[in-house]
Image (cartoon, grey):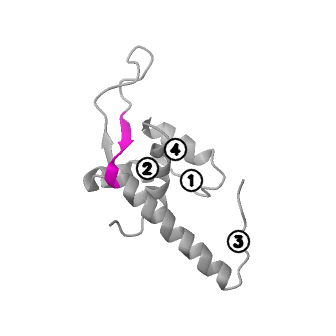
Amino acid sequence: MITSLTNAEFHILLALSRGDKHGYAIMKWVEENPGAAIRLGPATLYRTIRTMLGKGWIEELDERPDPQIDDERRRYYRITGAGRVGAAEEAERLAKLVSLARDSGFKVLRYS
């Protein structure tokens, strides 16, 4: 069981749950999803990626999509089984928190 994730960790896992991505693509995915409501700068992104690699939540890939059209400096990442479990646990924790907020009389806005 993973304890609650930071916003950056959770959003990186969400981005990678959609498929393998390099760092800049992760940042763009978060930026383009208004429900995220955070901005991942390069320092936060790569510091968080290093931490997540160490925890086994994501892995760096050896293979590249197409070396002919890809920048060789890019590093690609993939979510692991442990990362999927952690993201699911965090989603459940957040759902319970939203339910508690509703039960406490707070109106919860929905993003579309």
Residue contact at pointers 1 and 2, CB within 8 angstroms: no
Which numbered circle lies on residue 14?
A: none
Q: Is the residue 3 above or below the residue 79 in the image?
A: below
Amino acid type, residue under disc 1 in the picture: Arg
Choose the circle earlier in sequence order: 2 or 4.
Answer: 4
Q: State the CA–CA distance, disc 2 to disc 4.
A: 7 Å
Q: Which amino acid type is shown beneath numbered disc 2?
A: Leu
Looking at the rendered structure, which numbered label has been put on residue 108?
3
- Residue 71, given in percent of the width and then of the height, sits at 41, 23
Callout 3 amino acid: Val
Q: Is residue 57 visible?
A: no
Q: Which mark is residue 45?
A: 2
Q: Earlier in the sequence, mark 1 or mark 2?
A: 1
Residue placed under numbered mark 4 in the picture: 27
Report the residue marked by disc 1.
39
- In space, the residues marked 3 and 2 are separated at their CA atoms by 28 Å
Question: Helix or strand or loop: what does disc 3 sit on?
Answer: loop
Alpha carbon separation for disc pair 4 and 3: 26 Å
Q: Earlier in the sequence, mark 1 or mark 3?
A: 1
Extent of the magenta region: 75-82
Q: Secondary structure at mark 4?
A: helix
x and y, in percent, of residue 86 in the image: 39, 60
Give the amino acid at mark 4.
Met
Q: How many marks?
A: 4
| Residue 80 pos. (x, y %) | 33, 47
Q: Earlier in the sequence, mark 4 or mark 3?
A: 4
Q: Quadrant of residue 22?
A: top left
Give the vertical position of 8 relative to 60 (above or below): below
